Amino acid sequence: MKKYLPYIAFAIICLLLPKGNLYAQRMLDRAEVEKIRMSIIQERLQLTAEQAKNFMPVLNRYRKEQMELRQQIMKLRRKSLVMTDEDLRKAMEQEFDLREKEVALARKYHKEFLTILNVRQVAELYQSELEFKRLLLERIGKGARLPDEMD
């Protein structure tokens, strides 16, 4: 019986895995999450057509650059489990540097946002991001699965 245990475990795991293309499911989830984020932003900011045309590409660039920094941080953290103490110390310093880059990026785009939106709309943008995160946490609490690369 013991020699069949690995085969039985493998069969159970295969049965429990969701059917279909996991990558496509993840992409649909990410698209759904972004759709919710954009609807919250558009509702809260009440953008004019001209503002939306100018603002959305800037916001998308910011999110892309922000995600790249966060992925670098996560990569450092994943490696930390197998690092020596000295390498771990260096990785922590690298993470601090990346966090500083995140702040610099936020400042850069904050200035750019203010060239397109008024100050109240920018403040609403930041509030809408907090609302969005709260909604995501509620969904997680209800058992929803989030995309791997979302913040």
Image: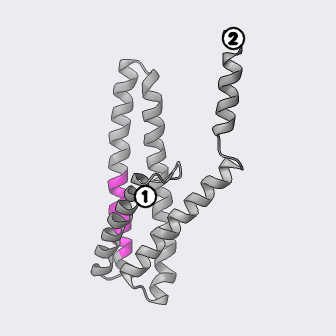
In which quadrant is the N terminus drawn? Answer: top right
User: Where is residue 11 shown, x and y percent of the image?
Assistant: 70, 29
Indicate the quadrant where residue 118 lies.
bottom left
Residue, x 66% and y 31% (percent of image)?
12
Q: Amino acid at mark 1?
A: Arg
Please tell me in which quadrant of the rendered image residue 128 appears.
bottom left
Q: Residue at x 46, y 75 (%)?
A: 39
Quadrant housing residue 122: bottom left
Residue 45, placed above or below residue 66: below
Residue 92: in magenta span: no
Q: Which residue is mark 1?
A: 139
Q: Is residue 123 left or right of residue 25?
A: left
**Image position, residue 80 (x, y; %):** 42, 27
Question: Which residue in the structure is indicated by mark 2?
Answer: 1
**At 36% across and 79% down in the image, what residue appears?**
44
- Residue 69: mark: none
Asked if residue 2 is positioned above or below residue 15 in the image, the reply reads above
User: In the rendered structure, which disc, 2 or 1, sits on the residue that comes first in sequence?
Assistant: 2
Look at the image and give the residue range highlighted in magenta: 102-113
Q: Tell me the kind of residue under disc 2.
A: Met
1 sits to left or right of 59 = right
Tell me the chief SS of the magenta region: helix
Looking at the picture, how far across and down is residue 48, in whole percent? 44, 89
Mark 2 burial class by Cα count in 10 Å: few <14, some 14-19, many 20+: few
Q: CA distance from mark 2 to mark 1?
A: 42 Å
Q: Is residue 70 left or right of residue 103?
A: right
User: How many numbered marks, from 0 up?
Assistant: 2
Nearer to me, 54 or 46: 46
Disc 1 is placed on an element classified as helix
Is 106 one of the magenta-colored residues?
yes
Depth check: give the residue in front, 48 or 13.
13
